[in-house]
Image (cartoon, rainbow, N blue to C red):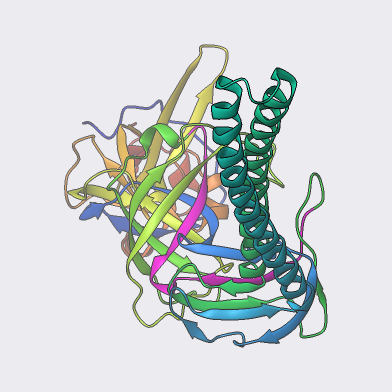
């Protein structure tokens, strides 16, 4: 596209007042569009153990940092009261069993008596009242037998409950992992959870192989995030050792995170290559999620891009300044993707064009037509021996540089 597409602005100079600038050129760069998000490291497989019964801690079988296997005993709650309750419940079961045996014997005895009475009644040797009395006793004995059986069922259920509570005095590891925190000591009382009252936290066990990164992505950027995208993760404790990751999960529902005013979405990133970083859950980190495939494009330093917005006409445009023989030329451009350092340049320009990239203070105040103090511009200025009259005579080198 032509470089001189903006209206020149003439400035009156009294001597060679040159603006010192830094120059760069258009180059082929790999642009990786990305989104930055902050979060922390967490374990996917992590359990916080608590007690289901009330009692003093009688023994701790692990220390913080120990490796445990699934099924390992890690903590013992005092079980004296539960053992006493077990003896009582077992005694009740035995008593009900004995009562049932007694009822069976009684029923058999009454059945024999009833058979004899029935024979005598049929022979009119006993009266009807005596016969019906034996029949009622037999029926009541059978009812008592059924009641005893139900009593035994109840006693066995109570025994099962006592055994279950007794088993809960032994805290077993439900996963393979490492004890990441130990929150109770021997002699302290473990409190069971109840309605609206949280119980005592005993310890936390986590699988170190399941560590991942959880970050919060602003709702304005979530549309660009997809499962499977590559990410670069930097833990705050290791700022110079980025880790590689892959987006695994994107939350369906937004939430307002603590310390933020807008809505955010939880994004989980698996760590594919941790390098030499020692990962610890809870570490703060930031993640750079690359939203598009890397492309080799023509690019310029992002410092050279100037954004101008016309709110009255509801339009915005991008510009850059180029060195046109020692003169700054403001040039409208079209831009594409960008990363932290470079901006894709869609406009077609010559490869040897010098682009003004700074200093930032000078670039902000630069006006189309300003004279530049660069290596080449400096040589042009010295060779021409500019004077005050050179800025006023049409046809001079400076006049031609401004288009006159």
Q: Quadrant of residue 402?
A: top left
Q: Quadrant of residue 111?
A: top right
157 vs 315, nearest the viewer: 157
Figure check: 62 above or below 16: below
354 vs 343, nearest the viewer: 343
Main SS class of the magenta portion in the image: strand
Q: Position of residue 351 (x, y in %)?
A: 16, 50
142 vs 187, nearest the viewer: 142
Figure check: 176 above or below 324: below
Q: Quadrant of residue 241?
A: bottom left
Report the side of 309 relative to 157 (left or right): left
Q: Quadrant of the C terminus?
A: top left
Report the side of 238 relative to 255 (left or right): left
Q: Reply yes or no: does residue 66 show up in magenta.
A: no
The residue range painted magenta reads: 198-220
Q: Position of residue 329 (x, y in %)?
A: 37, 40
Q: Position of residue 135 (x, y in %)?
A: 65, 27
Report the side of 271 relative to 367 (left or right): left
Q: Position of residue 139 (x, y in %)?
A: 65, 30
203 vs 20, nearest the viewer: 203
């Amino acid at each position: 596209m032509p470089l001189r597409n903006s209206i020149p602005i003439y400035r009156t100079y009294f001597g060679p007042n040159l603006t010192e600038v830094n120059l760069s050129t258009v180059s082929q760069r790999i642009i990786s569009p990305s989104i930055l998000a902050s979060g922390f490291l967490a374990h996917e497989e992590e359990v916080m153990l608590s007690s289901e019964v009330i009692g003093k801690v009688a023994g701790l079988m692990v220390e913080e940092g120990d490796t445990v296997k699934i099924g390992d005993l890690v903590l013992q709650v005092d079980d004296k009261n539960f053992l006493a309750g077990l003896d009582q419940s077992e005694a009740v079961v035995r008593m009900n069993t004995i009562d049932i045996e007694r009822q069976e014997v009684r029923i058999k005895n009454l059945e024999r008596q009833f058979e004899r009475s029935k024979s005598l009644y049929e022979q009119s040797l006993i009266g009807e009242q005596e016969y019906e009395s034996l029949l009622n006793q037999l029926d009541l004995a059978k009812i008592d037998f059924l009641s005893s059986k139900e009593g035994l069922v109840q006693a066995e259920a109570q025994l099962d409950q006592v055994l279950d509570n007794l088993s809960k005095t032994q805290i077993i590891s439900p996963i393979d992992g490492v004890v990441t925190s130990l929150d109770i000591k021997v002699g302290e009382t473990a409190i069971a959870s109840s309605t609206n009252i949280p119980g005592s936290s005993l310890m936390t066990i986590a699988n170190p192989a399941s560590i991942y990164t959880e970050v919060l992505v602003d709702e304005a950027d979530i549309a660009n995030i997809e499962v499977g995208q590559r990410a670069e993760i930097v833990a705050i404790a290791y700022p110079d050792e980025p880790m590689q990751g892959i987006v695994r999960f994107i939350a369906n529902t937004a939430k307002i995170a603590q310390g933020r005013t807008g809505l955010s979405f939880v994004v989980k990133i698996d760590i594919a290559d941790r390098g030499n970083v020692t990962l610890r859950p809870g570490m703060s980190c930031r993640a750079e999620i690359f939203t598009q495939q890397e492309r080799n494009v023509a690019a310029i330093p992002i410092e050279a891009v100037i954004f101008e917005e016309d709110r009255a006409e509801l339009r915005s445009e991008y510009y850059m300044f180029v060195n046109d023989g020692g003169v700054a030329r403001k040039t409208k451009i079209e831009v594409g993707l960008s990363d932290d350092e470079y901006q894709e340049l869609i406009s077609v320009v010559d490869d040897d064009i010098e682009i003004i990239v700074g200093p930032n203070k000078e670039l902000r105040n630069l006006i189309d037509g300003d004279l530049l103090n660069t290596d080449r511009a400096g040589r042009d200025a010295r060779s021409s021996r500019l004077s005050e009259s050179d800025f006023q005579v049409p046809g001079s080198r400076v006049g031609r540089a401004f288009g006159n």
